[in-house]
Image (cartoon, rainbow, N blue to C red):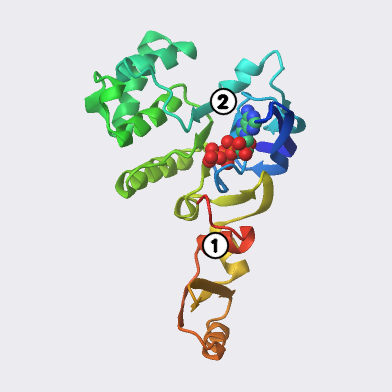
Amino acid sequence: MIEVKNLSKVFKYKDKKNQMAEKTAVDNLSLDIKAGEIFGLLGPNGSGKTTTIRMLTMLLKPTTGEIFYDGRHVDIDDKDVREVKQMFGIVPQNLNFDMDLTVRENMELHGRLYHMNRKDREERISELLKYVGVEEVINDKVRNLSGGMKRRVLIARALMHNPRILFMDEPTVALDPQVRRRIWELIRQLANKGTTVLITTHYIEEAEELCDRVAIVNHGKLLDIDTPQGFISRLGRYVVEWTEGTHKEFKLFNCREEAGQYLTQLDAPGGIRKSNLEDVFIEMTGRKEGL
Ligand SMILES: Nc1ncnc2c1ncn2[C@@H]1O[C@H](COP(=O)(O)OP(=O)(O)OP(=O)(O)O)[C@@H](O)[C@H]1O
């Protein structure tokens, strides 16, 4: 469905000394995302996730590389790029509403932008607000909604024109666990109905619980792609954790017995637990800061 070949983005900018500098935000990224899949881009802050989404949604021109949708090569400069963009629903990281308009008015604007007729707009607005569970705030100004409600309206608005592919940039950032779970449920329902979902996150739990497959990225580079369980069973299902001075150390094992033997040999206080995607992530990136 979405195929990305050797995609790179190098930003040119002026540094603090007013000298021209370059930053490689995305470095030779190749991906193949299947229809109906929930695909996660997992990486720390600054690893190039937003830049990738902006290139895939034709908002930013790649420095090099190619993008294909359903096997068709697409480019931001294509004459029919508008038609391609109709396929996308975009849930940006920032809440880009007109805060002084009501929920209905914000959704109306979006519907008009996508040339939906009045009847379709009205039907879709009430259907979607009901779907995301915030129909009671339809006439409230967006400014007055809670953070969780704003995020849900952001998702509803992105779905107005029935997109086939939903791009979500950190959709649950700064939300409490209950609201986060409700949004995950919504995303699962959409994928079950056939929508392809590409989600960026730096929440490892989100990637582990929600995504069919995950691409781990760091410094703009793809480190590896697998299912969350695939990563865990490849890198080790058990973790021996122990303390060395003030440091916490860990080592991954695939067999509980081996983990037990290792722990016995260690002359340090520790224990064994099941591993999770966070252990895999730290093992692969060797860093935890920024998460
Ligand atoms: N217009 C720009 N000019 C220069 N550097 C940029 C520009 N946009 C992004 N960058 C840099 O590119 C890198 C990748 O940024 P990007 O926003 O894609 O990362 P991210 O993984 O989405 O991070 P976050 O979760 O913080 O949004 C960062 O180092 C960022 O500072």
Nearest the viewer among 238 and 88 is 238
Above or below residue 272? Residue 155 is above
- Image side of residue 78 versus residue 164, left or right: right
* x and y percentages locating residue 258 in the rendered image: 58, 85
* Residue 9 in view (yes/no): no
Q: Mark 1 Cα within 10 Å, few/some/many (few <14, many 20+)?
A: some
Write down the residue under mark 2: 87
Q: Which mark is residue 158?
A: none
* Front residue of this view, candidates 239 and 33: 239
Q: Is residue 203 left or right of residue 66?
A: left
Image quarter (top left, top right, bottom left or bottom right) of the N terminus: top right
Q: Vertical placement of 42 versus 6: above or below?
A: below
Secondary structure, mark 1, is helix
In front here: 208 or 83?
208
Q: Read off the residue under disc 1.
A: 229
Q: Can residue 151 be seen from the camera position used here?
A: yes
> In the image, what residue occupies the spot 72% across and 17% down?
77
Q: Residue furthest left?
A: 136
Residue 245 horizontal/vertical position (percent):
50, 77
Q: Residue at x 72, y 41 (%)?
A: 27
Q: CA distance from mark 1 to mark 2?
A: 30 Å
Residue 166 position in % (x across, y down): 51, 33
Q: Residues within 10 Å of mark 2 (few under 14, many from 20)?
A: some
Sequence-first tag of 1 and 2: 2
Residue that lies at the very extreme toward the front in this rendered image:
17
